[in-house]
Amino acid sequence: MRYCSFFILVAIFAAGLVSCKQPANYFRHAGLTQGTIYEIVYESPKGENYEQEIKQILYDFSQSLSTYIPTSLISRINQNDETAIVDDFFRAVFNKAVEVNRASNGAFDITIAPIVNLWGFGFTGNIPDMDPQKIDSLLRYVGMDKVRIVGDRVEKDLPGVMLNMNAIAKGYSADVIADFLKSKGSRNFLINIGGEIVARGVNDSNQIWRVGIDRPDVNNLFGGDELQAIIRLNNRAMATSGNYRRYFEIDGMKYGHTFDPRIGYPVMHNLLSVTIVADDCMTADAWATACMVSGLEKSIQLLQNHPELDAFLIYSDEYGNFREFLTDGMKRIIIE
């Protein structure tokens, strides 16, 4: 449902991280988690390095919500393991998924897993299968009304219901790391997990963090090579969803990895990229996907009902040219 976009963190590089020269109380860590790259920069008031603690948090998070780990909590739930007990990570993401599913008229739905797997974008590694009968047969397992948390366990209406939280989990993991850093007294940090970003305070040059939004060009393979815009991210979070990097092509037709859970097919519209800025990254992450599924016109309508969200939509016109739609809030934080 999502692609991994590695945004250029403009303020970080401008502050001198390229040369690896930083004030003693600023730390930078990078690595791999949830099948993507993370980069974390933070000020430590006591000069303490939290790299090992951060790695442990990300490890524990993956053990809860990664569908690519057969023994993870979500994998056990997908396998109908009756001994699987819901943890705090799972509960928080599930509850947010229910909220955004209802608010987006079903455009965001974590029960999309069987459809995503059938099309070859999921955790089973299937060869893409576009058999309409198979798609229709799997739709009976899709729908947030078919699954719920009761006490400390997940209940399903049908055993075939499976969950895929890739479109929301990375955003929440950035929030979790942010909460950890705040608990240590850090007021200035930037967290980037696969393009899902949380920014607080200022960088080591005492400037508000600036981040880039990638230009949604199929040739823009590495985040930051071509930027559509740069924004100030002042004590907020940002997430982006798009269809231009992960897709397959059959008989000249491109099929992206963003699916409409209501019909079981990849979305086919002119909306290329959605960037959402919100107070927390889990919300931004989920709404970026919800808008990407909904398309341009319906996304604009949804955003009008949610003024707490700032949005930057990039779409193509009838001639294939890039066009932009920005909410008023986004216009106030854009730099160029």
Image: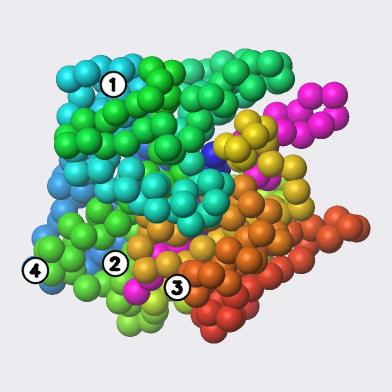
Q: Most prominent secondary structure in the magenta stretch?
A: strand
For label 3, the SS is: loop
Closer to the observer: label 3 or label 4?
A: 3
Task: Name the one closer to the observer, 42 or 78.
Answer: 78
Question: Do the residues bearing badges 1 and 2 touch, measured as CB atoms within 8 Å?
Answer: no
Q: In this view, does 133 lie above or below 102?
A: above
Quarter of the rendering containing residue 283: bottom left
Is any atom of residue 80 visible in this view? Answer: yes
Q: Give the range drawn in magenta.
A: 235-257
Front residue of 98 and 256: 98
Q: Name the residue under label 3.
A: 308
3 and 4 marks in contact (CB < 8 Å): no
Contact between labelled residues 1 and 4, with CB atoms less than 8 Å apart = no
Give the CA separation, mark 2 to mark 3: 22 Å
- Give the amino acid at mark 3: Glu
Residue 318 shown left or right of residue 271 in the figure = right
